[in-house]
Amino acid sequence: MTGKVYLVGAGPGAPDLLTLRAARLLEAADVVFYDALAHPDTVALARAATHVCVGKRHGRISPSQGAINRALVRAARRCRTVVRLKGGDPMLFGRAHEEIQALDRAGIAWEVVPGVTAALAASAELGISLTRRGVSRSVTFVTPAVGDGEPRADWPSAVLAADTAAIYMGAGQADRIAAALLARGLSHDTPVVLMEEASLPGRNAGWGTLASLPRLAARWGHAPAIILIGRVLEEALEEARRDHGRRPAAAASPLVPV
Amino acid sequence: MTGKVYLVGAGPGAPDLLTLRAARLLEAADVVFYDALAHPDTVALARAATHVCVGKRHGRISPSQGAINRALVRAARRCRTVVRLKGGDPMLFGRAHEEIQALDRAGIAWEVVPGVTAALAASAELGISLTRRGVSRSVTFVTPAVGDGEPRADWPSAVLAADTAAIYMGAGQADRIAAALLARGLSHDTPVVLMEEASLPGRNAGWGTLASLPRLAARWGHAPAIILIGRVLEEALEEARRDHGRRPAAAASPLVPV
């Protein structure tokens, strides 16, 4: 018997931001491989499954991606339904390509279930649309994190050319990000928000500008965080300054200007 | 009594790509406002609610955005739970900003529930990760569609600067898109896929290059479609050409090269 591997988006963190399809697959799973950031309640939906933590966290990888690939192949040779649960969406900064390639080589069937990505959860919680008529018609999702042996990509160009940018896995190197964007001519007063743990009870949003991003990150950027940059944030930044950290609107998070 | 308005992402189309939170809100809704593209099974989850179709389709708007805004305010003054169901994610090309602004002005509480956006559903179905180590670390989501009285934005710059691009609401103007990108120096052989009705039974994917995009769109681009552009598509395009439209992998869609 050879089973099938489902690369499943777990969404941004809150268990109820999982899709119905993902929930059903977890319930049917024989084995589930999950990252360190997966919510326990989400993993617990896989009631009948063996649970295997493959512990990716903060860009550090343990076990290696190769070991995860091999474990998926082995599991599919033993079990009918293998779920590889991935934070956010599998196809956005999820290294899905490497897992798919390994499964293809081993002749194992797979399917991808999309999920809600972190930037959209942050946008929802902040109550700020990433696009807006007359202000933003392009949004770029980018990461400055570079893997071993990988060439450095020109991520600042993508940020500069888009109206709104969401930077993934960047809070730990906010100094370098701010310096790179300032050097490329992005204005020091460009509004920025750093949101950690979007959709989770521990969420926090730190408001500032490109110039104050390093200070924001020093204060907030310890949990997994997303950085949003762009003019769509302007009014909310002003409100956050005026109201000393509270927006009157429905936004769920405490919003603290720096 | 004043109720609360939930701007809820319906996901890309398939009813089971709705989030658990969205499903629960629909079940509790007193009134649901939905677009023409909403799946009937998704709307049907709002069993106890009055259903109001506000019929946006293909960029044409009927009723006007202003009329929708006013209807949301009126409904919130009569009902406890008002759901504004939006295709994909509310904060990405969903005009959520305008609805939020109207609700704020009327002093009505609101909350945004994020959803799976179309580009990620297309990526999942095609089995092609939008990011890939060493190839793509930035993805831009853009629309060339321009509203009445709105300045023309420089969307081609965002596409050129990113490693991968997803173009929303562009299939109807594929000629103009291809011409604009070619004029800016994007190579004519840049791989392109046009996917319509991602996640739905009627899905189709047309494969080609930037040069053949207008022909692809003439053939496929009648239903709502997403256009993906970038080097991450290269191997799949070659496979589609070699296998005359079928990828051996798990991708669910018939893949037709042009």
Image (cartoon, coloured by chain):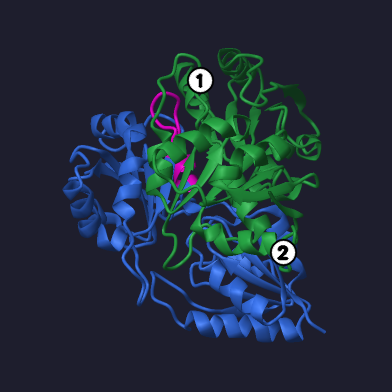
Chain colours: A green, B blue
Mark 2 Cα-neighbour bin, 10 Å: few <14, some 14–19, many ≥20: many
Q: Residue at x 22, y 45 (%)?
A: B210
Residue A85, position as x, y percentages in the image: 65, 33
Host chain of mark 1: A
Disc 2 and disc 1 in contact, CB within 8 angstroms: no
Q: Secondary structure at mark 2?
A: loop
Expressed as whole percent of the image width and height from the top left, the position of residue A4 reads: 58, 28
Q: Is residue B248 above or below residue A132?
A: above
Q: Position of residue A161 (x, y in %)?
A: 37, 47
> Which residue is label 1 attached to?
A147
* Mark 2 vs mark 1: in front: 2
- The verdict on residue B126 being magenta is yes
Estimate the spatial distance between the alpha carbons at disc 2 and disc 1, rounded to whole Å.
Answer: 38 Å
Q: Is residue B114 left or right of residue B192?
A: right
Please, is residue A30 above or below residue A189 in the view? above
The quarter in which the C terminus of chain B is drawn is: top left
Q: Quadrant of the N terminus of chain B?
A: bottom right
Answer left or right for B7 relative to A248: left
Query: In the rendered view, does B216 fall on the left or right side of B116?
Result: left
Q: The magenta stretch spans which residues?
A: B120-138
Chain letter of mark 2 equals: A
Mark 2 or mark 1, earlier in chain: 1
Q: Which residue is mark 2?
A: A247
Residue type, label 1 = Gly
Residue sitting nearer the eye, A187 or B187: A187
Image-quadrant location for residue A10: top right
**Can residue B127 be seen from the camera position used here?**
no
Q: Amino acid at mark 2?
A: Arg
